[in-house]
Amino acid sequence: AQVCAAAAAPAAAAAAATAAAPAADGASKIRQMGGNAALRICSDQVVVDLRSALKELVENALDAGATKLEVRLKEHGAEMLEVTDNGRGISRENLDGVARRHHTSKLREFDDLGRLRSFGFRGEALSSLAALSSLSVATRTEHDAVGTSLSFGRDGEISARSKVARDVGTTVCVARLFEPFAVRRRELVRTAQLEMRKMLAALQAYALVCTAVRFSCVSLSAKTGRQSLLQTEGGAAGMRGAVASIFGAKQLSELIPLSGSTDRVTIHGFVSRPRAGHGRRASDRQYTFVNSRPVDFPRLARVVNDAFRASTAKSECFPFLLLNLEAPPDAYDVNVTPDKRTVFFVDEAALLGCIGEMVAKLFAAESCTFAVHTPDTLPLAPRPAAAAESSSSSSSSSS
């Protein structure tokens, strides 16, 4: 509970919230809210849409050491969201607590946050998904002869258990998200295609930085049939290969590497060359990561955007930006909001100043670079028509 004090204030407040009930004298009596009611109210602070549901499942798979991650959607994710990985799986002694609230294998004490390098640590994801959908999990470790299939009730307790044949790894299936909330459910169904695009953008972000993992995403729909939405190779291709797989070779050709470091933070990634036509009208291709975790860092983006616009004289242009900041856990705080996308650095001013200098030097060098033709590549100018006719007439007279 101490871990969530800063990050899940709405959930903590709701858990301790009170319900007003008429007393005998006509006044209101303060009493504690029932545990099941508090769970259902607070769960949507962690999982607010399809994108956040996918985020939690992908991060669980990455924490399990997965090198292959497959996402399957039915009806754009409104009917089913399924994530399968080839990670370590869940051991049998951990199965009972896998969807219980604030049950986690990542930490025990609040001070453990200063040493934590995993994506997840609060133990809220599967508990929230169980309360908001029909949740099932199938898993197997390398020590198990067969896998185990589990179904969960709204309270996160196992409602059914059976043996299943499967490879080592885990599959988590979220069916009919927001089913207990009629209004939320109708809105999800109505905007399913838009939510799927947001979810795909989130998955692309993980694929760009977790380059050793092979990502794939398939959508199944009664109207459109089967569609492959994402496919990366993984392995040794690195960020360059991921960019080419997701956005194409043309986008990759417009980028230049950006790298540097401060006393405690190492920066590496790519940014658009400061040339006309290389920027975008929207910031939809700007990605910032801290230790491979996607985060929102608008102050950093502003530094890069201002430098790019100054170099290109384009006031409404956004460069492609892909930056991963590697830092020790005690150099920043990601335990700020439930989605863990807001991040604070211990010495943010020095970090932003360093990045600003790096970008300025890089763009200044690019601005002084010109394409040079060699004699072999120099284009031949066409002969003027008048000169050609004159030459032809002279030849005829001579003959």
Image (cartoon, rainbow, N blue to C red):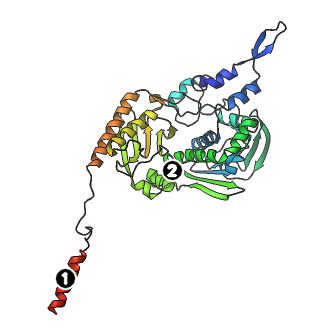
Observer-nearest residue: 357 or 113? 357
Residue in view at x 25 percent, y 76 percent: 385
Q: Mark 1 points at which residue?
A: 391
Q: Is residue 164 visible?
A: yes
| Viewer-closest of 126 and 196 | 196
Q: Which amino acid does label 1 sit on?
A: Ser
| Real-space Cα separation, disc 1 to disc 2, in angstroms | 65 Å
The quadrant of the image that shows the C terminus is bottom left
What residue occupies the far bottom of the structure in this picture?
Answer: 399
Query: Which quadrant would residue 269 be assigned to in this image?
Result: top left
Which element carries disc 2, helix, strand or loop? loop
Query: Closest to the observer: 255 or 87?
Result: 255
**Residue 265 image label:** none
**Looking at the picture, how far across and down is residue 273, in whole percent?**
36, 49
Image quarter for residue 56?
A: top right
Sequence-first disc among 1 and 2: 2
